Every structure is written in structure tokens, then in C-alpha cells.
Amino acid sequence: MQLDLTRYRQPLTHVAKTFQPAEAGGEGEAYRVVQPVALDFDLHKDKERFRVEGTVRTELELPCSRCLEPYRLPVDAALDVRYLPASELSADDEREVAAEDVDISYYRDDQIDLIELVREQFYLALPMKPLCREDCQGLCPQCGVNRNTGTCECGSGWEDPRLAPLKGLIKGTP
């Protein structure tokens, strides 16, 4: 969904949009959108520069990194992104990215892609290591059983076969 910037002439406009999960999700994403996405923001206009300041709310489903079971992650993320026209982006100009440049994006043809904005916020909201719960036991490395829902008879001790000769040295010492 594109936000047509030519429709907004006031310096401040409130915008509220709702997207269905199929619209906001994409193929090959690390998550699945399971609830409608509520995008609520103020659009600040300063000539050809815009600032989007607001929130995005939904619920994502992603796999636990330990047990691989899907779990739901509520998202209530604040967003604050400045948009500049793509004409201000110079392909030949190499420069270091400053801290204040991190929240800058560029728009083309007087359009801001709201789906791209929402997906970016989802990735920023994802945890580094997604866990279904803090005390998740994960999968057994030998048989693959989910230790949260079942038990296995596998031994928990593992010895590195490369260190077996050293183990013989320790046993031989009185």
C-alpha cells in the first residue's frame, strides 16, 4: 500500500491504516503476521521532507530458536522515520553513515511504501534469539524430542572422541 504524499498539504496530518495479515506478510519472512496490523501515525510535512511518527501494533508468529515450536509475539512498536526525496540521495557520493542518518529513508514518485515501513518495524521488533518462554528446554540433540513436552532416554553426557587419548592419561595417573 502506497501513501500518496501529494494528498497531504497541511504541516501535520493524522493517518490511521489497518492492513490484513496477508497484505503485511511476505514470502520467506522470519515471521508470520497473524493479526491485523494497525498503523497509527502523525505525518509531519516540511516542503518535500516528511516525518512519520507513531506506532504499529499486531501479533507475529515465529519459531522458537530452541524447540522450533511456533509462538506468538505481540508487537507494539514506536516508529519515527524521516523521509527525504530520492533526488537528495546521490549514488556517487560516498560518506560515512552518522547516527542521525539511521532513521532516514527515501521516497520516490511522491509515494511512501507503508508495507515496507511496517516490515522494517517488524524486523526491528524481533528478538535476537526468539524463545517461546525463558525456561524453554529445547530439543534433545540425540533423538530430537521436544524436552518441553516429553522426556527421552538419551544420556546427557557427551565426550569428544578427539580427547579420548587424554582421558587414558588421566586414568593411568595414581
Image: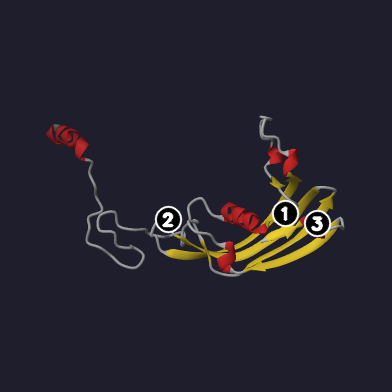
Q: Which residue corresponds to mark 3?
A: 6
Relative to 47, 159 lies left or right: left
Residue 168 falls in image quadrant: top left
Q: List x then y, in percent, for residue 12.
A: 84, 58
Numbered marks: total? 3
Frontmost of labels 1 and 2 is: 1
Q: Could you tell me which secondary element the residue under label 3 belongs to?
A: helix
Q: Residues within 10 Å of mark 2 (few under 14, many from 20)?
A: some
Q: Residue 161 at what x, y percent from top left? A: 19, 40
> Which image quarter: residue 159?
top left
The image position of residue 9, as x and y in percent, is 86, 57
Residue where numbered disc 1 is placed: 111
Q: Earlier in the sequence, mark 1 or mark 3?
A: 3
Among numbered discs 2 and 3, the one appearing first in the sequence: 3
> Cα distance, mark 1 to mark 3?
8 Å
Viewer-closest of 84 and 7: 7
Residue kind at label 2, given as amino acid type: Ser
Residue at 46%, 58% in the rendered image: 131
Q: Residues within 10 Å of mark 3 (few under 14, many from 20)?
A: few
Upstream in sequence: badge 1 or badge 2: 2
The residue at which mark 2 appears reads as 65
Secondary structure of the residue carrying tag 1 is strand
Which residue ends up furthest to the left in the rendered image? 172
Q: Please determine whether, in this image, residue 170 is positioned above or below residue 159.
A: above
Give the answer, above or below, for where 55 lies relative to 160.
below
- The quarter of the picture where residue 173 lies is top left
